Amino acid sequence: MNGVSAAQRFVPSAQLRPLALNVVSIVAFLAVWHFAAAIVNSPFFPSPYKIVQAFVTLATNGDTMGNSLWAHCWASLYRVLVGFAAGVVLGVPLGLLMGLVPGLYTATRSIVEPFRFIPPIAWIPLAIIFFSGLPRFAFLIFIGSFFPVFTATLVGVARVEQIHRKVAIAYGASRYWVLTHIVLPTVLPDIMGGMRVALGAAWLTIVAAELSGGTSVGLGRMMVNYAELLQIPEIVVGMVLIGALGFAMNEILLLVERRLFRWRWQVTL
Amino acid sequence: MQETVKVRADITHRYGDLLVHDGLKLAIRENEFLCICGPSGCGKTTLLDIFAGIIKPSAGQVLIDGEEIDPKRHNISFVFQEPSTLPWLNVRDNIGTGLRIKKRPKAEIAQKVDDIIGVVGLRGFEGYYPHQLSGGMKQRVSIARAFATDADLVLMDEPFVSLDQPTREKMQREVLSIWEHRRRTIVFVTHNLEEAVFLGDRVVMLSAKPARIVADIPVDLPRPRDPVSGAFTALRARCAELLHEMHIDDGVNH
């Protein structure tokens, strides 16, 4: 029945072409890196091969303290997910509330807005005093991911078109129906966009948070440990893994977005 | 023929000091196609909002079957001037919006939506989203949404004003054919006299603000009407004359 979107859903050449181009880019990038490392020829500039070696060693034998690479990844990922979830769970309703109750945001703007400019890293000293373990990291990531979600939701509510609200009211809808069937569908794309920004902020924060101590696992922690040993390849492995995990989570969100918002003409990057 | 009054309105409405409607009295028969015409800015859209129960008049009331209008209790349908399809719903779900708000059973919604899709000629487009449709088709979806419910009252606010002339004429004929399939009480607002005379059982002419009814003209031309027939053009000319006189009055008054 759904002729048009079925055609849009999968066009092999349109999807495979960017994939092929990206493979070419990666190979080119690695080649340039490899030759640059060969020319410089210094232990402070490891070649891609050295990184792969370090990765394999870490993955099979664990680090110098006996923690597996998997444990480091999972620790960071878990903290990111908990803090990020808290940011979304609080950011969306608060954004809706501030957006829907007239005057609430304008009346509290001078309190709400300055918080946005205090970076998560600036909360680390307080977090060290008040929390330890998972709550500390989750709190810092929550700080980083709350505002992107909150702000995007707030902005999205302003996008609700009066005519759509009027349709619902004319046909006898309750306020709750308007919220769930008019406001939410309108704001959802903004919320998803905010979530992807929040995810970036979450990964930025986790490394800084783990550097602040209070843990023996986590990718940030692992990188600091190897910094003290001046082992650069292992540090780069940590960097690559953070990039890869963040990228993977972003792709998952994008996939959800594309499925959810087929009604839009385009999905932003 | 037995004719029952479906809607009875007696409306006086103010915006602050501005008197918009001055004791406007209307009785609309069941299944009547009523057209309301008037100079621009005479408060036609506000009048429809009052009919829909979205705005409460400063004085007076609108009664449907003897009860005060309430969109939560009565089945009111509204076709707006601007595109009002919900962009995140496909054609089928857009048409079912009114029925879902009324919490009708799923099977009934599916049945009624399917029936009306056939009537408005959107068969095959059920899964399309509004951005994939032309302006005329989007308006057809809004009209289908309005006729999918067992509406007590269908309100139409210049629904074809943004369409090009051929599409507009086509849509006028389609609305008539839908109305012939699904008899409903319709209030159709337009500033286009030809449209009013072509569509309506009756044309009510409003004055400029404060709006009063200056003429209530039954259109007893047989359907389908021929806009170039002598009787049609004569009636249309009479309406135009009334409208013209109003503008002169308007000039004298101010």
Image (tube, coloured by chain):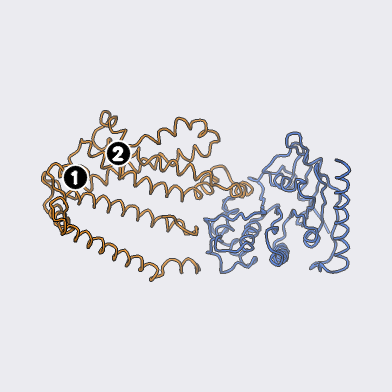
Chain colours: A orange, B blue
Q: Is B63 or A111 nearer to us in this picture?
A: A111
Q: Mark 2 highlights which residue?
A: A138
**Residue plotted at (85% across, 69% down):** B229
Q: Residue furthest bottom?
A: A13
Q: Residue furthest front?
A: A39
Instruction: Give SS at disc 1.
Output: helix
Q: Which mark is nearer the camera, 2 or 1?
A: 1
Task: Tell me the kind of residue under disc 1.
Answer: Met
Mark 2 vs 1, N-terminal side: 2
Residue A87 placement: quadrant: top left
**Residue plotted at (42% across, 40% down):** A91
Q: Tell me if A52 is positioned left or right of B131 in this view.
A: left
Q: Position of residue A179 (x, y in %)?
A: 52, 44
Q: Tell me if A42 is positioned left or right of A262 in this view.
A: left
Instruction: Give SS at disc 2.
Output: helix
Label 2 Cα neighbours within 10 Å, binned few <14 / some 14-19 / many ≥20: many
Q: CA distance from mark 2 to mark 1?
A: 20 Å
Residue A223, labelled with which disc?
Answer: 1
